[in-house]
Image (cartoon, rainbow, N blue to C red):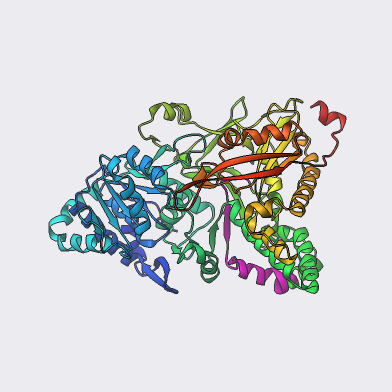
Amino acid sequence: MPKAAENLQSIPALLARNLKVFPKSPAFREKEYGIWQTQTWADVAADVEALALGLINIGVNTGDFVAIIGRNRPSLYWSMVAIQATGAIPVPLYNDANAEEMAYVLGHCGARFVIAGDQEQVDKVIQVQEGLKQFEHMIYLDPRGMRKYDHSKLHEFSHVMSQGLAARDELAPELAKRTALLNYDSICVMLYTSGTTGKPKGVVLSNRNIIETSKASSQFDNLNVDDEVLAYLPMAWVGDFIFSIGQAFWTGFCVNCPESPDTMMTDLREIGPTYYFAPPRVFETQLTSVMIRMEDAGKFKQWLFHKCMGLAKRVGPAILDGKDVSSIDRLKYKLGEFLIYGPLKNTLGFSRVRVGYTAGEAIGPEIFEFYRSLGINLKQLYGQTEASVFITQQPDGEVRNDTVGVPSPGVEIRIADTGEVFYRSPGVFVEYLKNPESTAETKDAEGWVATGDAGFIEKKSGHLRIIDRAKDVGKMATGAMFAPKFVENKLKFYPNILEAVVFGAGRDMCTAFINIDLTAVGNWAERNNIAYASYQELAGHPQVLETIRDHIAEANKSIAQDEMLAGCQVHRFLILHKELDADDGEMTRTRKVRRRVIEEKFVDLIDALYDGSDEIFTRTEVTYEDGRKGEISATLSLLDVAVQPLDAKVAAE
């Protein structure tokens, strides 16, 4: 682990340190045309210098905002460092954002320059560039399809680097001067929030925020130069920036970029990362894939799988945490490792995972325990963009499915009288760009930040438990607590359920919208010779409706066991005729449900759930992949679900 030094106050300074300490160690790796290509820290340092010179050559000034749009590629990662070296500020955008969403961010920060990954991203910017007053030049990485474009404001990435090197004697002193001026208070990056409740806000993060957080979190899990991480999450997300830039440049470990989103799982298996992060949705999808494969397996394999997994669930987490387990159970577990756990981890790409994390949404307890039972050191963390990710982490040996851990090193936490969680740390953001009102509402004069989440700290363990978003936690008409996330996570444990949205605040009972998982349910349909032509047709199939009803009834049994939230059992539900989609404004780009948007958009469906209707006809506007608008209609069935009776004590509470 590299030691801190006073001059390591910027990411370019960390790169210079890495060039001296381990120049030949792999820094970035990318799979192209089926072959892994490796860049050492010496290679990265040379490329960063060439691009930084090229950026100065085309007019990038200190303090400029430079947008980066594209999928995870080494060139785009170290482009952010080159931008920093020039004194400018990198602003990564979500590569799946549409042109209008990009126009808002580019206009809000006043980006003069854009680095785009390919023709698709270039086209989006060209579509809105007339409305961008400050925009001047765009640099594209992949030249395919770009030959006939107007190049008066377009520049090929490699040409910018070549021109920078050609002018090195002239520009090197200026680059050195700008880089030397960088310090802990300089802006390191600006990242936009997902905009769950409104327009995205530009979160300004300093070098102090990123480096101190990266240092503390790396030491917490003993990350070092020999670790490997797979970079596949959106580059605009703060977690990816911390893992693939902050921690990578602090420790010197290698960042691996998949060939494409479609090959991610194959590339994951080939790399076998030692350090891995995924939001709950990814773990849910992988578990769904496992369960689908097991349904297609022979009866003996199914019996062996369930037998071994029963043992793993009972003793696996205890073995992982180094707790006492009988010799016989340890022997049986080793046999299970040989027969089931080892091959399964290899299939998932988790054979070498030493530290794994999930965050962003609460993960279902059953899903979490499944992975830990295999011997995968999966832990939970709690964080925000405004915290430079880390607020709490789970220490090894103290991992539980119902908490998010203890305060990360250097982080202070307090719980307000309202139950809202507040924190302060070296990672606390500088400000929201051009939004002093929101900055003051979120961060007070003493540096305490309001998370917007409700929770409490356990007195005995010191672990933080998050109940739900503070604004979503409420009371039902019965007086019972309403916490929709708690219920939704119970429902999403089932492979057939992709997404759930629960309603009930101020009502006498809870109801739910369900999105089925097309992969899981489609596999079931194929095995049962059930023909279907679309998501909508499958979602309305009577057997699918009954299956989902059974899942919800089973989840109700689990919910009823929680005295505080037993009143949140789901009484009625419907399966939506469309998947919730970010392009339709129903979810953020990080796949978080925009609850208020859904409540307004589908108010007729919610009303029908509560007025006792058996079915309802509805029309909904949708956005197609090419940006065109359309409309779909359907007659939806509304079903009742069995609930568990509340005892007198719970009902009274």
The reply to whether residue 458 is in sight is: no
Q: Which residues are magenta?
A: 336-362
Residue 251 percent coordinates (x, y): 43, 58
The one nearer the camera, 95 or 440, is 95
- Residue 351 forms part of the magenta stretch: yes
Number of dots carrying numbers: 0
User: Where, by quadrant of the figure, is residue 639 drawn?
Assistant: top right
| 361 sits left or right of 505 in the view | left
Compared to residue 502, the image places residue 251 above or below, namely: below
Which residue is drawn at the image coordinates 49% and 31% (left, top)? 448
The quarter in which the C terminus is drawn is top right
Which residue is drawn at the image coordinates 38% and 28% (left, top)? 436
The reply to whether residue 558 is in sight is: yes
Residue 273 percent coordinates (x, y): 53, 65
The quarter in which the N terminus is drawn is bottom left
Compared to residue 194, the image places residue 625 above or below, namely: below
The one nearer the camera, 292 or 558, is 292
User: Where, by quadrant of the figure, is residue 208 drawn?
Assistant: top left
- Residue 8 forms part of the magenta stretch: no
- Outermost residue toward the left in this view: 170
| 177 sits left or right of 35 in the view | left
The one nearer the camera, 360 or 530, is 530
Which residue is drawn at the image coordinates 80% and 72% (left, top)? 299
The one nearer the camera, 196 or 626, is 626
Residue 318 percent coordinates (x, y): 73, 58
| 141 sits left or right of 382 in the view | left
Compared to residue 261, the image places residue 107 above or below, namely: above
Residue 74 percent coordinates (x, y): 38, 62
User: Where, by quadrant of the figure, is residue 596 drawn?
Assistant: top right
